[in-house]
Image (spheres, rainbow, N blue to C red):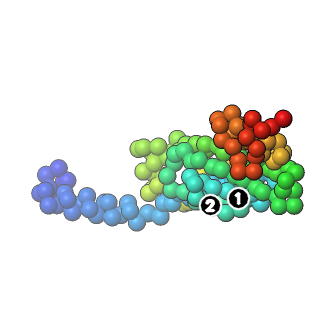
Amino acid sequence: MSLISAKPIDRIAVLLLLFSALSSVPGCVDRSLSIRTDPAGARVFIDGVDVGVSPVTLPFSHYGTRAVLVRMEEDDQRGERSLAPQHRLVHLSPPWYQRFPIDIVSELLWPGTIEISYEERFVLQAQDLDALSQKFHETAREHGVIGPLEPPEDDQR
């Protein structure tokens, strides 16, 4: 008896058996994103969520674009110098074997574990907080905003 001449219920049974056999094959894909900073120890945020202190490695299940923010404040240098935070959009593109329809083989049928890893490096640069504060106050004055401890412009001489 061939599958073509079989009854519809027999075809369904054969397809279910084939599907269950394929789903029992131990295919696996481990995806990870690593964030490293220089100097290490910066706080890392991915899509607005605090994920820890660098270096940090996180698993992910979906490809796409992630917004990564790293920042570090050095309390002992506060007021003189600090490290400027960095924001970057990180694009996680699937490799060719993770695109449809080939991904069916790599996700379900491949007999081992496939490891896919991405790494982003950030070099934090020093910034002068006094200069940053001065620029903030100048911009505020340009827009007519006066701080509670600052004299109005007409009183300044």
Q: Residues within 10 Å of mark 2 (few under 14, many from 20)?
A: few
Amino acid bearing label 1: Arg
> What residue appears at the point 63 percent right and 49 percent down from the top-left corner?
68
Looking at numbered disc 2 in the image, what kind of residue is underneath it? Asp
Q: Residue furthest front?
A: 155
Vertical comparison of 142 with 20: above or below? above
Q: Position of residue 69 (x, y in %)?
A: 65, 50
- Observer-nearest residue: 100 or 125? 125
* Residue 44 visible in image: yes
| Image spot of residue 142 (x, y percent) | 69, 33
Choose the circle earlier in sequence order: 2 or 1.
1
Which residue appears at 63% of the width and 55% of the height?
Answer: 45
In this view, 54 is above or below 155: below
Q: Is residue 95 visible?
A: no
Residue 77: quadrant of the picture: bottom right
Give the quadrant of the C terminus: top right
Q: Which residue is mark 2?
A: 50
Res 21 quadrant in image: bottom left
Q: Where, quadrant-wise, is the N terminus in this rendering?
A: bottom left
* In the displayed structure image, the side of residue 51 where residue 133 appears, left or right: right
Residue 84 location (% of width, % of height): 76, 47
Residue found at x 32% / y 60%:
19
Task: Please give the residue where the numbered disc 1 appears in the rendered image.
Answer: 43
Q: Position of residue 76 (x, y in %)?
A: 87, 61
Direction from residue 133 to residue 48 in the image, left or right: left
Q: Which is nearer the eye, 150 or 86? A: 150
Q: Which mark is residue 115?
A: none
Q: Tell whether label 1 touches label 2 (CB within 8 Å).
A: yes
Judge from the rendering whether residue 130 lies leftward or rightward of residue 65; answer left or right: right
The span from disc 2 to disc 1 (Cα, nearest Å) is: 7 Å
